[in-house]
Image (cartoon, rainbow, N blue to C red):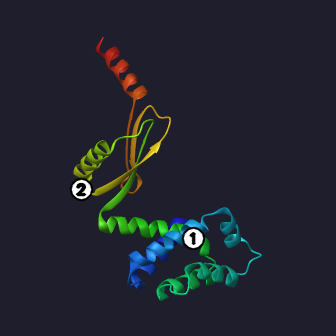
C-alpha cells in the first residue's frame, strides 16, 4: 500500500519539477536522514504536530531549495505523509534509472574481484540486458558469486555447493 501511495506522489513531483535530477539529489540526502530511527519516530509521532514535522524537513532542505520541492514537502506535511519520503525517493530513483537505462547492481562473494573482472561482468550484463549496469562489491561468506540488479529483476548465483549438487544429480541420472 505504501508503494502505491509513493508512486502517486512521485509521479506528481516528476510532472511539476523542472530539474528532476537536482531535486532527486536533494531527496536522496533527505531520505537518508529520514530513514534513521530518531527522525522516523519523530515523523510518525502523534505528539509532534504536522507543522513542526514539515518545518523540520524544510529546515533540512535549506533556504535555496527548489520551489516545487518545498511545495511538495508542504503537501506531504499537510497530508501526514512525510514518513513516505524514502519510499517516494526510491520510486523516483527507479524511474530515473529506467529513463537513463543505467542501473546499479551488487556483486557478493568471499573474495574481491579485480577491476578487469568486474568490468567484464558489467560488459556481459550490458550485452544480455541492453542496459548499462554499474556493479559494486560486497564481501560475504558465500562460497561462490552472486550478482543482483534489483531494479531489473536480475539475480545470478554461482555457488560451489549448488554446482556440486547438480553434478551429483547428473551422475546419478546417467547411471
Residue 124's spot in the image, x, y percent?
Answer: 25, 46
* Label 2: element kind: loop
Q: Quadrant of the N terminus?
A: bottom right
Residue shown at the point (58%, 80%) measured from the top left: 76
Instruction: Classify residue 73 as left or right of residue 50.
Output: left
Residue shown at the point (41%, 79%) measured from the top left: 14
**Camera-side residue of 16 and 108:** 108
Residue 79's spot in the image, x, y percent?
Answer: 61, 81
Q: What residue is shown with label 2? A: 130
- Rendered position, 122 above or below 32: above
Q: In the rendered image, is residue 1 in sight?
A: no
* Label 1: element kind: helix
- Rendered position, 147 above or below 14: above
Which numbered dot is residue 84?
A: 1
Instruction: Classify residue 67 as left or right of residue 145.
Output: right
Which numbered dot is residue 106?
A: none
Amino acid at each position: 500500500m505504501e508503494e502505491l501511495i509513493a508512486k502517486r506522489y512521485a509521479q506528481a513531483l516528476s510532472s511539476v519539477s523542472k530539474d528532476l535530477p537536482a531535486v532527486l539529489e536533494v531527496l536522496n540526502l533527505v531520505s537518508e536522514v529520514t530513514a534513521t530511527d530518531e527522525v522516523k519516530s519523530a515523523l510518525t509521532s502523534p505528539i509532534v504536530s504536522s507543522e513542526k514535522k514539515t518545518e523540520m524537513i524544510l529546515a533540512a532542505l535549506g533556504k535555496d531549495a527548489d520551489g516545487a520541492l518545498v511545495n511538495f514537502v508542504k503537501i506531504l506535511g499537510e497530508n501526514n505523509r512525510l514518513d513516505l519520503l524514502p519510499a517516494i525517493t526510491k520510486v523516483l530513483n527507479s524511474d530515473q534509472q529506467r529513463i537513463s537505462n543505467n542501473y546499479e547492481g551488487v556483486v557478493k562473494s568471499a573474495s574481491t574481484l579485480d577491476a578487469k573482472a568486474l568490468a567484464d561482468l558489467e560488459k556481459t550484463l550490458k550485452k544480455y540486458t541492453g542496459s548499462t549496469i554499474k556493479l559494486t562489491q560486497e564481501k560475504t561468506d558465500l562460497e561462490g558469486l552472486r550478482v543482483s540488479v534489483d531494479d531489473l529483476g536480475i539475480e545470478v548465483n554461482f555457488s560451489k555447493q549448488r554446482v556440486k549438487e547438480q553434478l551429483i544429480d547428473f551422475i546419478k541420472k546417467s547411471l
